[in-house]
Image (spheres, grey):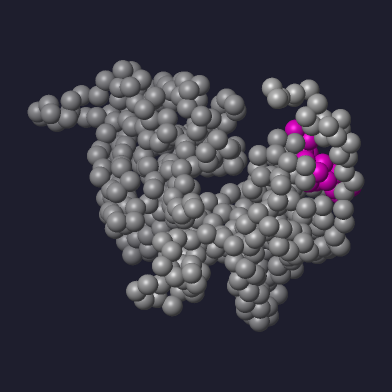
Amino acid sequence: MDGSHASGSKVAAADGPGTQRTQYPYVTGTSIIALKYKDGVIMASDTGASYGSTLRYKSVERIKAVGKHSLIGASGEYSDFQEILRYLDELTLSDHMWDDGNSLGPKEIHSYLTRVMYNRRNKFDPLWNSLVLGGVKKGPKGEEKYLGMVNMIGTHFEENHIATGFGNHLAIPILRAEWREDMTFEEAVKLVEKCLLVLLYRDRSSINKFQIAKITTEGATIYPPYSLKTYWGFSAFENPSQGAVGSW
Amino acid sequence: MARFDPYENNGGTCVAIAGAGYCVVAADMRLSVGYSILTRDHSKIAHLADKCVLASSGFQGDVKALQKNLAAKELVYEHNHNKKMSCPAMAQLLSNTLYYKRFFPYYAFNVLGGLDSEGKGCVFTYDAVGSYERTGYSAQGTGATLMMPVLDNQLKSPSPLLLPARDAVTPLSEAEAVDLVKDVFASATERDIYTGDKLEIVIINSSGSRRECIELRKD
């Protein structure tokens, strides 16, 4: 930021000379983990939101249901995510008002988000998020599972398992090694918890309060937050300077 | 503090080889950013018309926007003219589309392959802002610097300065061209970290088009 106005760093797009768009995020959420399993898609994240390196909020939902067939998870700027949720509410409302028995599936919602994110980057006014979209919908070939992501500049793709942020470095190797298409929900929860625990230990902005959500043909379920059991009793943790004696 | 950057390099390599009655268009399926791989199964190839295939690498967001835009224009052309767009027509359209965004370019490196109106194989190669040339073969993307000298060595295109102008199409048979494509990708994958995982090959000839997929190194 060129520092001329303290308040000018996040002005809505009322264009004119001196207007400045979001150039960096304020309150951010960390990784999202998501994977396909036997009956649908499971998604998980912690409930923290950081203000720089300060843990500002400890109980925010970063996973939400969209329409009847989808779940969205977001890392990055939390207020931008709330704006995206407003867009999606508008979208699902207008979809509902057609009242024609059709409804937008995860594929359509992902496609919509892709266009929103790419358009905003073209205006140099990005929504500072990585979004994960998962869902199941009955299609011509029966139940179709869907899992995709899109980032703040519009790069998007589909995958069987996705992890954003730190998760892309720490969780993806675990998921690649252990993921199967026919996992039961219980197995999927175990795998997701393993990833979350690694992130909790190594991602300093993650917190020990997690939410798991699933989407199946029965609809979306977002479970209440809970904690994982941690172990910090390693001897290197208890006396870290032992074995590293200084010269003085 | 880090400023917003509207571009990202997602890597990837595209190759096309034209022969007398065929064209081979190929691209790897890795999508990466920095040292991370986003996915190992992402197609960079768009089938724009019967005899016209586009392979693009660069920034995936721009690549998809560009390919969707061209596909939409092709559909309108079909409705207006009651025929599919020819490959040379699509080549000019692509050039204009890229130049239209000259001052906020599509970060996309394209190779367009197909058959021309006489049924001869054709390849068009581009830069990000729309400069283009019809050639007999080309490579674009992160692995292009590794592949292009090999293709030059194996295919020896006639100089564009020769008069009368010679055909740029390669003397190889279709099967030989496909094998060459597989070899150059396998080689580039050894040294280019942005190329690998899988290779998607589309072959267009007088009897239509077919798609082939082979595995590449995943490290």
Q: Which residues are magenta?
A: A177-198
State yes or no: residue A135 in magenta: no
Tell me the quarter of the image containing the C terminus of chain B.
Answer: top right
Residue B28 placement (x, y as % from top left) = 50, 34
Closer-to-camera residue (B126/A102)? B126
**Quick check: A14 above or below B104?**
below
Residue B126, quarter of picture: top left
At horizontal 77% and vertical 46% (from top left) the residue drawn is: A200
Magenta: main secondary structure:
helix
Is A115 left or right of B163, judged from the image as shown? right
State yes or no: residue A182 in magenta: yes
Closer-to-camera residue (A65/B183)? A65
Residue B139, quarter of picture: top left
Is A147 left or right of A223, judged from the image as shown? left
At horizontal 33% and vertical 32% (from top left) the residue drawn is: B138
Q: Hey, which residue is sitting farthest left in the picture?
A: B163
Q: Is residue A189 something that shows in the picture? A: yes
